[in-house]
């Protein structure tokens, strides 16, 4: 039996809210169909993240407060979430597919003896059944996964798959849940240090220069880096480009990589396969360069240039100096 609530795990990175959590609140509200949307927030006692969370319109916020959450292990977080999950369980429980979310969610799923779908790209309801869409078979097919017999229905969702939207139409009820913090006996987190490098930030970049197979030559790559430096952006790649030793999976865009939402995206030598398009659907303005005038990428672009990527970059860099 479930209580017709959609719970969303609110992840804190230090004292800041992980943006994916707010994106999931907005998505949960859009598909709720009269279900209540509940933000679940583990935080230190001196934090007040619920003030920010309330601006995104949940019906209720459940806080679990303990100063040890600042450096809590994933197992400790999962244990706390398990304690506050009632016998009459929520219909669904959504997590960001971040490093933390991908670790906490399966630990909680094992305790609840329910199902979990990882790295979803879409969510919607059919009556009370949560349809969880994700890529499969080498990212060539989108499949719908359901959990008909157990609750909550659990899913992790990739960052930037949805947009977060402020909603001040309601004042959420805030509940301070009671629980007992059970310290992990075999591991202690002494300090959390954010990663400051390209692999941590491609999903958050405001400007992305994306390279595909058609731009896989040293000159084009060099010019792309120069343009990214001038514009204050980052270079990302399609899956085939991860075979180039210069790029790794941490820079890959698409179904099996990152979903991005930059203000400006410049595609170079990218044909526009479905697997890539899924990862850029939230880009605000898209410019694409390809030698093939019939390349599918142009249908997804605000501006297109039919021609050589190296020549395009050379001309653009000359204009930006």
Image (spheres, grey):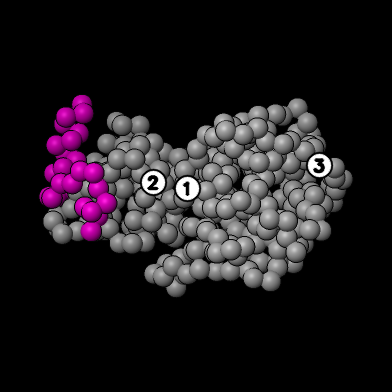
Left or right of 78, for residue 201: left
Q: Which residue is nearer to you in this view: 19 or 56?
A: 56
* Measured Cα–Cα span from mark 1 to mark 2: 8 Å
First in sequence: mark 1 vs mark 3? 1
Work out whether 245 lies above or below 168. below
What residue is at 69 percent from the left and 71 percent from the top?
149
Left or right of 113, for residue 215: left
* x and y, in percent, of residue 233 in the image: 35, 36
- Residue 162 is labelled as 1
What residue is at 31 percent from the left and 48 percent from the top?
210
Number of residues whose C-alpha sits closer than 10 Å to that of mark 2, classed few (under 14), some (14–19) or many (20 or more): some
Query: Callout 2: helix, strand or loop?
Result: loop
Look at the image and tell me whether residue 139 can be seen: yes
First in sequence: mark 3 vs mark 2? 3
Query: Callout 1: helix, strand or loop?
Result: loop
Q: Which residue is nearer to you in this view: 140 or 173?
A: 173
Labelled pair 3, 2 in contact (Cβ < 8 Å): no
Q: Is residue 54 magenta?
A: no
Left or right of 235, for residue 118: right
Quadrant containing the C terminus is top left
Circle 2 sits on which residue? Answer: 282
What residue is at 78 percent from the left and 31 percent from the top?
45
**Image quadrant assignment for residue 235:** top left
- Residue 177 is labelled as 3
Find the residue positioned furthest to the front: 34
Task: Find the magenta span and give its range.
Answer: 296-321
* x and y, in percent, of residue 238 in the image: 34, 56
* Measured Cα–Cα span from mark 3 to mark 2: 36 Å
**Image quadrant assignment for residue 146:** bottom right
Q: Which residue is nearer to you in this view: 232 or 35?
A: 35
Labelled pair 1, 2 in contact (Cβ < 8 Å): yes
């Amino acid at each position: 039996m479930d209580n017709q609530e959609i719970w969303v795990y609110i992840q804190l990175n230090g004292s800041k809210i992980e943006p994916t959590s707010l994106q999931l609140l907005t998505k949960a509200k859009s598909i709720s169909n009269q279900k209540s949307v509940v933000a679940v927030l583990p935080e230190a006692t001196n934090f007040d993240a619920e003030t920010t969370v309330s601006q995104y319109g949940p019906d209720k916020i459940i806080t679990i407060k303990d100063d040890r959450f600042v450096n809590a292990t994933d197992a400790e977080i999962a244990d706390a979430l398990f304690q506050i999950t009632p016998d009459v369980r929520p219909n669904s429980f959504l997590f960001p597919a971040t490093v933390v979310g991908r670790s906490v969610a399966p630990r909680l799923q094992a305790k609840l003896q329910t199902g979990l779908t990882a790295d979803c790209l879409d969510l919607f309801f059919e009556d009370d059944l949560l349809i969880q869409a994700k890529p499969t078979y080498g990212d060539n097919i989108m499949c719908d996964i359901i959990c008909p017999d157990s609750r909550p229905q659990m899913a992790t969702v990739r960052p930037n798959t949805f947009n977060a939207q402020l909603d001040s139409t309601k004042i959420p009820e805030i509940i301070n849940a009671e629980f007992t913090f059970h310290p992990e006996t075999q591991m202690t987190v002494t300090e959390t240090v954010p990663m400051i490098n390209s692999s941590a930030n491609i999903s958050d970049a405001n400007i992305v220069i994306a390279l595909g197979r058609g731009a896989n030559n040293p000159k084009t790559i060099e010019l792309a880096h120069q343009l990214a430096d001038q514009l204050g952006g980052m270079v990302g790649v399609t899956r085939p480009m991860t075979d180039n030793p210069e790029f790794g999976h941490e820079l890959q865009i698409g179904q099996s990589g990152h979903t991005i939402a930059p203000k400006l995206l410049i595609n170079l030598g990218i044909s526009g396969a479905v697997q890539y398009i899924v990862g850029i659907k939230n880009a605000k303005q898209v410019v694409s360069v390809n030698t093939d005038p019939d390349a599918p990428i142009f249908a997804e672009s605000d501006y297109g240039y039919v021609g050589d990527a190296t020549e395009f970059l050379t001309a653009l860099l000359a204009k930006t100096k």
